[in-house]
Image (spheres, rainbow, N blue to C red):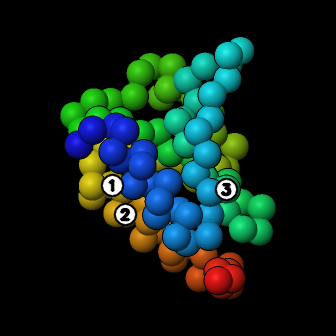
Amino acid sequence: MNEKLLERKLVAACKKLGCKAIKFSSFYDTGYPDREILIPGGFTWWREIKTTGEEPSLMQKVKIKLLQDMGFNVGVIDSQESLDQTIRDLETFLKQIGYVKKE
């Protein structure tokens, strides 16, 4: 599946849940995941988005490990299945923290 389509689906799903998946980029420190998911309550998850069949670069793998070692929830979305899993995990997490989206 195309990276841009996966990104659009992630952004839409996060919005529906009351979260925000913002595009992250840094000119000074490259390799960070594409999307930073801002979760109510002050939580942040990171997701690298890849076209199906592609893998993160070496620098991206280094940054993913760095963020994981710091305790962040970090993952790679490279298919509809991995996108669906991220959304299920996010729904579960929101329930665990007691978040109820305000309409």
The residue where tag 1 is placed is 82
Q: On screen, 3 above or below 94?
A: above
Relative to 69, say whether 37 is above or below. below
Asked if labels 2 and 3 touch by Cβ distance under 8 angstroms, the answer is no
The earlier-in-sequence mark between 3 and 1 is 3
Label 2 element class: helix
Do callouts 1 and 2 mark residues in contact (Cβ within 8 Å)? yes
Dot 1 alpha-carbon crowd within 10 angstroms: few under 14, some 14 to 19, many 20 or more: some
Please tell me which residue is depicted at 33% across the width and 45% down the height of the picture: 5
Kind of residue at badge 2: Gln
Residue 85 tag number: 2
The local crowd at label 3, few if under 14, some if 14 to 19, many if 20 or more residues have their Cα within 10 Å, is: some
Look at label 3 and name its amino acid. Leu
Q: Secondary structure at mark 3?
A: strand
Dot 3 or dot 2: first in sequence order is 3
Point out residue 55 in the picture as x, y percentages from the top left corner: 32, 30
